[in-house]
Image (tube, rainbow, N blue to C red):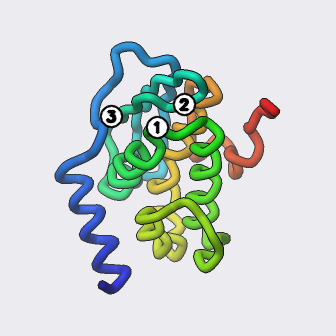
Amino acid sequence: MHTNSLYQEVILDHNKKPRNYGKLDHASHQATGHNPLCGDRLDITLQLENDQIQSIAFQGESCAICKASASMMTAAVKGKTRMDAETLIHEFRELTTGKLDTNLPHHLGRLTVFSGIRDLPTRVKCAILPWHTLHAALNSLTNASTEADQDPVQTIVPDHS
Ligand code: ZN
């Protein structure tokens, strides 16, 4: 299937049936993300146990791209360790900004349908917002904004090693 039609199909599917939509009652970590350019706003709640994401949920008001990205993200990081999630965040960011060589090994799987978005700079922020917000939640920052910093994933990473 052509990448573009697969992309549209995936976006539609995840908007019709968003995965992990809602809010966890007992979240160990949470953050709110905001993309003023588009008006996207979303809340991510997650439960981290033994450094593993046991459960995760998102909710909010956002455009189709943001919602599909959030839906796919929650499915992708559920059950993963914090470090594996951070790897995915980094790879997704590289993918949508056109820096990832998809011929080299990566962990994005079906998330690569978002690769075409690099040609749409205003939509990149929509697609990345859930990932910025997840990063903020994992690092216990309560707010993420695509406007706050040009390169938040690169600059706000606390060193836990
Ligand atoms: Zn948007």
Residue at the left extreme?
16
Count neighbours of disc 3 (C-alpha within 10 A) and say few if under 14, some if 14 to 19, many if 20 or more.
some
**Residue type marked 2:** Gln
Q: Mark 3 highlights which residue?
A: 59
Residue 13, picture quadrant: bottom left
Q: CA distance from mark 1 to mark 2?
A: 6 Å
Q: Position of residue 89 (x, y in %)?
A: 59, 50
Q: Residue at x 47, y 75 (%)?
A: 116
- Look at the numbered discs 2 and 3 and tell me whether their residues touch, using CB distance below 8 Å: no
Query: Which is closer to the viewer, label 1 or label 3?
Result: 1
Q: Mark 1 highlights which residue?
A: 79
Q: Residue at x 22, y 62 (%)?
A: 12
Of the two numbered discs 1 and 2 on the same chain, state the one appearing first in sequence.
Answer: 2
Image height check: is 152 above or below 46?
A: below
Q: Position of residue 148 (x, y in %)?
A: 64, 41
Query: Which is closer to the viewer, label 2 or label 3?
Result: 2
**Residue type marked 1:** Gly
Image height check: is 41 above or below 143?
A: below
Q: CA distance from mark 1 to mark 3?
A: 19 Å
Helix, strand or loop under label 3: strand
Q: Position of residue 85 (x, y in %)?
A: 57, 43
Q: Mark 2 highlights which residue?
A: 52
Helix, strand or loop under label 2: strand
Q: CA distance from mark 2 to mark 3?
A: 21 Å
44 left or right of 161 in image? left
- Look at the numbered discs 1 and 3 and tell me whether their residues touch, using CB distance below 8 Å: no
- Look at the numbered discs 1 and 2 and tell me whether their residues touch, using CB distance below 8 Å: yes
Looking at the image, which is closer to me, 153 or 72?
Answer: 72
